[in-house]
Image (cartoon, helix red, strand yellow):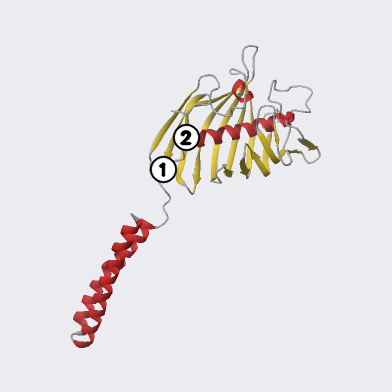
C-alpha cells in the first residue's frame, strides 16, 4: 500500500511540475493575471494531496486495543506488588497480623531494612532471586508510611528502583490508603492509586497506567484462604496500541490458593475495555481452579 501510494504520488508530482513550468512560461508571455489564477488552481490539488498522503502514510497510533491477556497479566503483577508490600509491613508486628499473608521473605538473599524514625522500609532483592512460589524479583522497593498500616487512615507510598517482577520492569509510585475494616464482609479495605505508572513488558513495550481501585482483602477462614476483591477504573496506553480505558463491571477476584501457586491472574469477575474510538470488549474471568486460561 505504501509503495503504491508513493508511485502515484511521484507521477502526480511530475505532472504538476510540468504544468507549473508551462503556466509559469505563459504568465511571462500572456495575461499575467489570468495565468496566475490558473497557476494557483493547478498547485492547490498538489498541496492538498501532499497533506492527505502525509496523514495517511505517517506514523499511525493504531486503533487496536491492548490485548486482554496483557491487561490481565499487568493487573496480576500489580496485585503481587501490593501483597508484597503488606507482607513486608507486618513482619515485625507481634499482634493484629493478617494471617495468612504470602511470605515474601522466602526469596533467597532478600534484605529488608527499617527506618522507624523516618517511617520507611526498604526491600532489596539485589540482582534477582526466585521465591518459593516461582516469582522472579529484582531491584528495590521502598515503602513510606504514615502509621501502622492496619490503622484506618494510614497511607503507604511505594517507590520502585530498578525493580522488576517476572521480567516486567516497574517505574513510578503507587499509593495505598487503609479505609478501615468492613465488618459485614470481614475484609480490610484499601484504596489504591497510580498516576503515570510505567510497566515495561518482556518485549520492551512500555505501558503507562493510571488507575483508581478499591481493594477489599477478605480474611481467610478455616475453609478458604484470603480473597481480594477489586473495583474501580483506569487507563492504559502505549505507542503500539490505542489508548485503552478499563472499568471493572463485576468485582475482580484473586484467590489465595492461585496466588500461592504462582498464578498472579484474576479468577472471577468481569471488566470492560474501551478504546479511544469507543470500541468495547468485555472480559469475563471464569477460571477452572488455578489454570491460566485466556479470558473471554
- Foreground of the two, 267 or 202: 202
Q: Does residue 87 lie above or below 43 as drawn?
A: above
Q: Residue at x 46, y 40 (%)?
A: 66
In the figure, is residue 186 to the left or right of 110? left
- Foreground of the two, 127 or 260: 127
Q: Quadrant of the N terminus?
A: bottom left
Residue 58, image x and y in percent? 40, 57
**Residue 233 visible within the image:** no
Q: Residue at x 60, y 35 (%)?
A: 78
How many residues crowd mark 2 within 10 Å: few (<14), some (14–19), many (20+)? Answer: some
Residue 31, image x and y in percent? 18, 85
Label 2: state its secondary structure. helix
Among the 4 quarters of the image, the one containing residue 177: top right
Q: Does residue 55 lie above or below 290 as drawn?
A: below
Name the outermost residue toward the bottom: 29
Q: Badge 1 is on which residue?
A: 64
Q: Residue at x 78, y 41 (%)?
A: 118
Q: Quick check: marks 2 and 1 in contact, CB under 8 Å?
A: no
Q: Quadrant of the C terminus?
A: top left
Tell how many labels: 2
Residue 25, image x and y in percent? 23, 84
Amino acid at each position: 500500500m505504501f509503495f503504491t501510494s508513493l508511485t502515484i504520488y511521484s507521477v502526480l508530482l511530475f505532472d504538476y511540475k510540468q504544468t507549473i513550468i508551462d503556466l509559469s512560461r505563459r504568465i511571462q508571455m500572456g495575461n499575467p493575471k489570468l495565468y496566475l489564477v490558473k497557476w494557483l488552481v493547478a498547485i492547490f490539488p498538489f498541496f492538498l494531496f501532499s497533506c492527505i498522503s502525509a496523514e495517511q502514510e505517517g506514523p499511525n497510533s493504531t486503533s487496536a486495543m491492548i490485548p486482554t491477556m496483557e491487561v490481565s497479566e499487568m493487573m496480576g503483577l500489580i496485585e503481587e506488588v501490593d501483597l508484597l508490600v503488606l507482607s513486608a509491613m507486618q513482619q515485625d508486628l507481634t499482634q493484629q497480623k493478617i494471617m495468612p499473608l504470602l511470605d515474601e521473605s522466602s526469596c533467597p538473599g532478600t534484605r529488608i531494612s527499617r527506618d522507624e524514625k523516618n517511617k520507611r522500609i526498604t526491600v532489596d532483592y539485589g540482582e534477582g532471586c526466585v521465591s518459593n512460589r516461582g516469582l522472579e524479583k529484582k531491584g528495590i522497593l521502598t515503602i513510606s508510611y504514615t502509621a501502622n498500616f492496619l490503622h484506618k487512615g494510614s497511607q503507604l507510598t511505594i517507590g520502585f528502583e530498578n525493580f522488576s517482577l517476572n521480567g516486567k520492569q516497574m517505574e513510578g509510585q503507587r499509593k495505598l490508603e487503609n479505609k478501615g475494616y468492613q465488618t459485614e464482609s470481614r475484609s480490610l479495605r484499601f484504596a489504591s492509586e497510580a498516576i503515570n505508572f510505567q510497566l515495561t513488558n518482556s518485549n520492551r513495550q512500555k505501558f503507562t497506567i493510571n488507575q483508581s481501585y478499591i481493594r477489599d482483602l477478605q480474611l481467610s477462614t478455616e475453609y478458604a484462604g484470603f480473597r481480594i476483591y477489586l473495583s474501580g477504573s483506569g487507563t492504559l496506553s502505549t505507542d503500539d496500541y490505542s489508548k485503552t480505558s478499563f472499568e471493572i463491571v463485576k468485582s475482580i477476584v484473586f484467590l489465595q490458593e492461585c496466588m500461592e501457586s504462582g498464578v498472579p491472574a484474576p479468577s472471577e469477575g468481569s471488566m470492560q475495555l474501551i478504546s479511544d474510538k469507543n470500541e468495547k470488549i468485555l472480559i469475563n474471568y471464569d477460571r477452572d481452579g488455578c489454570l491460566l486460561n485466556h479470558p473471554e
